[in-house]
Amino acid sequence: MTAAVPLPVLVPAGGGDGRQWRDRLELLSALIGGPGFDPLLRGDIIAFPRDHPVYWWGCRITGCERPRRENKMLCAGHEAQCRKACLAGADRAVWLREAAPLALTHARVPEPCWICGYRPAVRGVTRLCARHQHRWKHARGKAGGPGFGEWLAAQVPYDSYGGCRAAVCPELAYSPLGLCHGHESAYRFQGRPGGAGLPDAWFGRFEQAGRPVPVSYDDETTFGRWCQAALPLPRPGTVNLRGLAPLARAEIQSGLHAHAQAAEHAGWSLGWVQAIANACRGLDCLADLDTSRFDHTVRNAVTEMLAALQLVYLTPAETRDAGYLEYGHFGAGFSSRRGRFDLTAVSQRWLRDLLWDYTAAQLCSPQAPRSRGSYHNARRACVALSGFLEAHAPGGGHQPGLLSEEHAHAFAADLRHRASNGLPALGFSRADGKPSIVTGRSRNTVLNYARKIARHALDTGDADRIGLDRGFIVTLPHGGTMIQRTRRPFTDEIARALADPGNLARLAGTFDPFDRGIRDIWETIIATGRRSSEVIGLRLDCVGRYGGLPLLWHDQTKVGNYDEAIRIPEYIYQRITERQRKTLDRFEHHHGRPPGSAERARLALFSSPVRNLNGTRAISYHTFQAKFRQWVDQLDLGASCVAHQARHTLATRLLAHGAGLHHIRRYLGHVSAA
Ligand SMILES: [Zn+2]
Ligand SMILES: [Zn+2]
Ligand SMILES: [Zn+2]
């Protein structure tokens, strides 16, 4: 009989998410070994170059040798100096340019002795191990002794003490105890578990005499355990993943990879990554980690890693089974970071699956809607239908075969009845828990989307497959025109209040304390009639003069193309120029230098203070709307106003001045029948 070949271990299925950790390790190993994966991240000790585009770690003062503090720009020393100088009135940008570099207070990893090669050098200028250092001191002390070079040439190397016995440590042992300098200090600091020690005066008595140095223990096993459990020493620019379970290590490696792939990301400190790795010691995987002991920055990093892993671990079909859809599986990013589309509010499995299939088909189509609105409408329609079926269909509508024409009729009738009487929607509640009232607008949206999704199932053959009656589908009526939310122009009184210089000053002073340009955005919207999102998203270089006339390029990709430019009043031109100056100052304030031309081309005019070291990201639409609303609320205008109404106000004014409707439409870049 031949020796038994070990069979792959089959792990019993368990847990809601399907795959067990062995499968996961296989998936990740394939990913990590694949061609798109940064080879730097494959090692168990990852040493990042100082200027790595994502995981850079050096202080940004020219010539400074120290590492940055956490995810800050500067080392701790320069940060403290800078704070002090700025408090004393210095200009940060100027200070950054003129700051003198700081030297490392301790080397990253002790270098080997010049002579021994395998013993670490003690600190100092000579780069000698303790024993050679001692000999050199002795020789130098003698009258008429040799010069350093001459002495050096006469030296012989000593035996190495080997590598550090701390299992995770790549460094050389510093003494016969077998630990590197850092781990020897840590061992002493932790009360010398196991009592490992060297004899008194071991250097003179044993080593110098050429005898082996005996190491004594109270309990060698305890010492061994300490060595196994010791954490890696903090080394700038390095993430040490030794000592982790293979899956946990692969998860952190792919988490680092996924983070570096994102166009916009929070600045991670390598110290945080190391802290995560250290906390994973003894765990199978990242999901087992208790993150409550971390602060929110580290917790966010773990959450981001876990979210990226979900995309690898779960196939789209598995998310369908679990009742959600990952946008990331379809390459759809949207601007919001949350990538999960939850469908569990639809209680009938067949309906939920139809919705999933419809959404997936939309995401894969070349005409995929660019915002989430249309996906949310589709879900809303299914939730409404689901709620109705639960209440009125046989068996709660869980068996599609039991549904017929009459149920489709009844659903539409119920919805119309609710809309005319202002009743709450079935199966639907708002995020704040209050019932959602059916309006004419939501009625039309629900009917249209319910019909679209059902028809989609008919086209794909899924309706037949699940036994959903054709009569039910064709009876679902059209909802009619999708009613846009009514946007009336501002009344003269409101328009005056929203353009009043005193009120505008308050918008800037009270509601935009960090001067992110809320007032400038609002005034540009009034003057140009562009959509809020277009104005918020303006790049730095969006204005210019042509034949002396100030122009604004609203299409970011077409700067210099005069077809895409609009005339702006001189006053707005001045405001935007002033804003450019502030944004450039802010960049310089941060970096201590003006942006390079490639960097400048990517700068946002209204740059966000969050996750935005390079100034490329504009403040969010939500931030602007929130500030605008707070401002409007305190003006107490007796009517609700949204910034978008400015477009319509502008349109009415143009009409009043005799412009034709087609001109206005072209001007507003807005072709709608409304
Ligand atoms: Zn520094
Ligand atoms: Zn030496
Ligand atoms: Zn060590």
Image: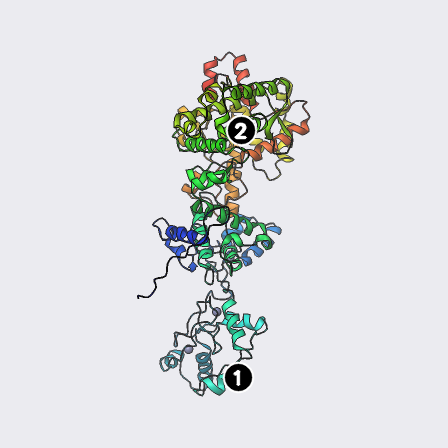
Which residue lies most toward the left here?
Answer: 1
Where 450 sits versus 511, above or below? Answer: above
Identify residue type, mark 2: Gly
Q: Position of residue 36 (x, y in %)?
A: 36, 48
Q: Quadrant of the N terminus?
A: bottom left
Q: Is residue 113 left or right of residue 571?
A: left
Q: Residue at x 44, y 58 (%)?
A: 246
Of badges 1 and 2, nearer the viewer stands: 2
Q: Position of residue 516 (x, y in %)?
A: 56, 37
Q: Residue 358 or 217: which is nearer the viewer?
A: 358
Q: Residue 576 or 35: which is nearer the viewer?
A: 35
| Residue 6: image tag | none
Where 570 sits versus 282, above or below? Answer: above
| Residue 84 found in image quarter | bottom right
Report crowding for label 2: few under 14, some 14 to 19, many 20 or more residues within 10 A (C-alpha).
Answer: many
Report crowding for label 1: few under 14, some 14 to 19, many 20 or more residues within 10 A (C-alpha).
Answer: few
| Residue 486 found in image quarter | top right
* Residue 403 in sight from this viewpoint: yes
Q: Give the CA distance from mark 1 to mark 2.
A: 83 Å
| Residue 199: image tag | 1
Residue picked out by circle 2: 397
